[in-house]
């Protein structure tokens, strides 16, 4: 475990934050998700312009300074000293990614999400991870892939391709927007399973509404019926805690460039060891058929940018040092503050789940008589605030993260109340 001094130094936190990263368990327990001093110190770790407010981590996140520094430093090093590269050991030399087993990063990912490092492959994003899985498993004509009607194109398209190319059947089930509750959505999805269902693909958190699905319970039911379960974690990684052993899905794909604060083009794929060994490679290099390290078999994907991966490693460290639980609590605290404020206005309709336990940092809402584009523009015109439009009906998707403040949420609510008078 890092001592307090190292921790503070690595985070760049000021002395003022000392009590919150104390070795004293009692002092740590005292840290609340609304602790102003601690979260102000965290905010200072981001270069994010102070005259703008970012509410769109659902699309792309914000890198803390330590991540930018790491990447920049490495990019400079490559530009000046690439001649240092002796080509002796791909796994030790950090010049280009794609031939390196990325063991250090994969180990951190495995630790964070509770799985074995051999089950983790690094990818560029969710779309790649899902494509590796859909393309790599064998389905027969008539085999069904079941999913919801609210999946992102990067999660579902590789399965549609499977349908068109191999005659598998891509089926969606409507889950409602807002989703009424965890037990309803569980029933809806389980009832849609047929004897032909071979794959169940679900977002762990639906990107359009921020609904956290009861994936553990659904995967348990699917497992009883021998169905392969794969979860899309684009919106959960870095936002809510993920315990893959507990969820017990067969596969999980995620990206780090939304909620984890990592550079764009960073993702991972987890596949249970028993399935990973029979998964066909999609991107093939030397190791495509070498089963000594299954995760490496999929991580090896040709020349890539090591600076980006070192930025990712710094982001994972930053996240772990604050603590996944603390990150989640802060995100949820701000999200809930927003939802509670919105609920007080009768002209506002919320499309995120009514059940608060299904929500964290994403809230989808609209004001009567407005489109999402109008609301997005009004936010920008009035206060340089940036949530993201979700079209004419659903208004905006408003994401809250650890660099946001209570004051930003309250100012956003004041704007909504002014517009919805
Ligand atoms: C649920 C979901 N799946 C997949 C994706 C695509 O992710 P990526 O761009 O990392 O491939 C997104 C992006 O917003 C998403 O929200």
Image: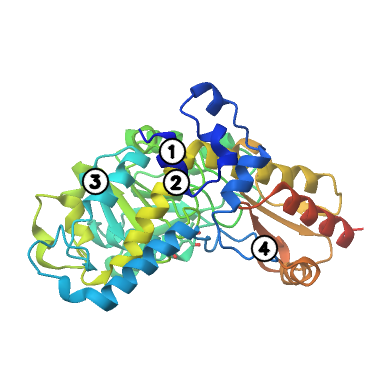
Residue 217 placement (x, y as % from top left): 45, 33
Residue 326 placement (x, y as % from top left): 54, 37
**Marking on residue 9:** 2
Question: Is the N terminus in the top left, top right, bottom left or bottom right quadrant?
Answer: top left
Task: List the residue tagged with mark 1.
Answer: 5
Of circles 1 and 4, the one toward us is: 1
Q: Which one is nearer the viewer's eye here, 395 or 9?
A: 9
Q: Categorize mark 4 by other alpha carbons within 10 Å: few (<14), some (14-19), many (20+).
A: few
Task: List the residue tagged with mark 4.
Answer: 50
First in residue order: circle 1 vs circle 3: 1
Q: CA distance from mark 2 to mark 4?
A: 23 Å
* Residue at point 10%, 66% (across, down): 286
First in residue order: circle 2 vs circle 3: 2
> From what the image shows, is residue 8 above or below residue 169?
above
> From what the image shows, is residue 336 above or below residue 282?
above
First in residue order: circle 2 vs circle 4: 2
* Residue at point 27%, 66% (across, down): 166
Q: Categorize mark 2 by other alpha carbons within 10 Å: few (<14), some (14-19), many (20+).
A: few
Identify the secondary structure beneath mark 2: helix
**Residue lying farthest to the top in this orientation:** 26
Horizontal side of residue 134 vs 321, given as left or right: left
């Amino acid at each position: 475990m890092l001592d307090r001094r190292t921790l503070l130094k690595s985070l760049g936190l000021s002395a003022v934050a000392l009590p919150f990263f104390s070795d004293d368990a009692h002092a740590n327990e005292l840290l609340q998700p609304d602790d102003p001093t601690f979260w102000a110190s965290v905010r200072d770790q981001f270069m994010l312009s102070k005259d703008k407010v970012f509410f769109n981590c659902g699309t792309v996140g914000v890198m803390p300074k330590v991540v930018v520094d790491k990447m920049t430093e490495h990019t400079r090093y490559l530009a000046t000293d690439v001649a240092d590269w002796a080509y002796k050991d791909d796994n030790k030399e950090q010049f280009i990614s794609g031939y390196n087993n990325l063991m250090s990063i994969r180990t951190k990912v495995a630790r964070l999400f509770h799985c074995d490092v051999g089950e983790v492959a690094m990818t560029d994003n969710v779309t790649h991870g899902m494509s590796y899985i859909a393309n790599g498993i064998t389905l027969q004509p008539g085999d069904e892939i079941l999913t919801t009607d609210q999946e992102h194109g990067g999660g579902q398209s590789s399965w549609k391709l499977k349908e068109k190319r191999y005659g598998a059947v891509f089926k969606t089930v409507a889950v409602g927007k807002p989703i009424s509750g965890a037990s309803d959505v569980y029933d809806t999805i389980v009832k849609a399973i047929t004897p032909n269902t071979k794959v169940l693909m679900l977002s762990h958190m639906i990107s359009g509404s921020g609904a956290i699905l009861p994936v553990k319970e659904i995967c348990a039911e699917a497992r009883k019926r021998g169905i392969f379960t794969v979860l899309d974690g684009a919106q959960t990684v870095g936002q809510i805690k993920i315990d893959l052993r507990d969820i017990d899905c067969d596969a999980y794909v995620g990206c780090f460039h939304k909620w984890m604060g990592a550079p764009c083009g960073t993702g991972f794929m987890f596949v249970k060891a028993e399935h990973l060994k029979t998964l066909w490679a999609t991107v093939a290099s030397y190791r495509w058929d070498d089963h000594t390290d299954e995760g490496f078999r999929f991580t090896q994907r040709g020349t890539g940018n090591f600076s980006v991966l070192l930025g990712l490693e710094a982001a994972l460290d930053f996240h772990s040092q604050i603590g996944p639980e603390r990150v989640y609590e802060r995100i949820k605290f701000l999200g809930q503050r927003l939802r509670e404020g919105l609920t007080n206005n009768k002209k506002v309709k919320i499309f995120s789940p009514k059940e608060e336990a299904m929500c964290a940092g994403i809230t989808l809402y609209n004001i009567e008589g407005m489109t999402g584009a109008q609301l997005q523009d009004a936010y920008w015109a009035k206060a340089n605030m940036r949530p993201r439009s979700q079209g004419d009906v659903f208004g905006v998707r408003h994401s809250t993260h650890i660099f946001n403040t209570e004051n930003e949420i309250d100012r956003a609510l004041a704007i909504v109340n002014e517009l919805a008078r």
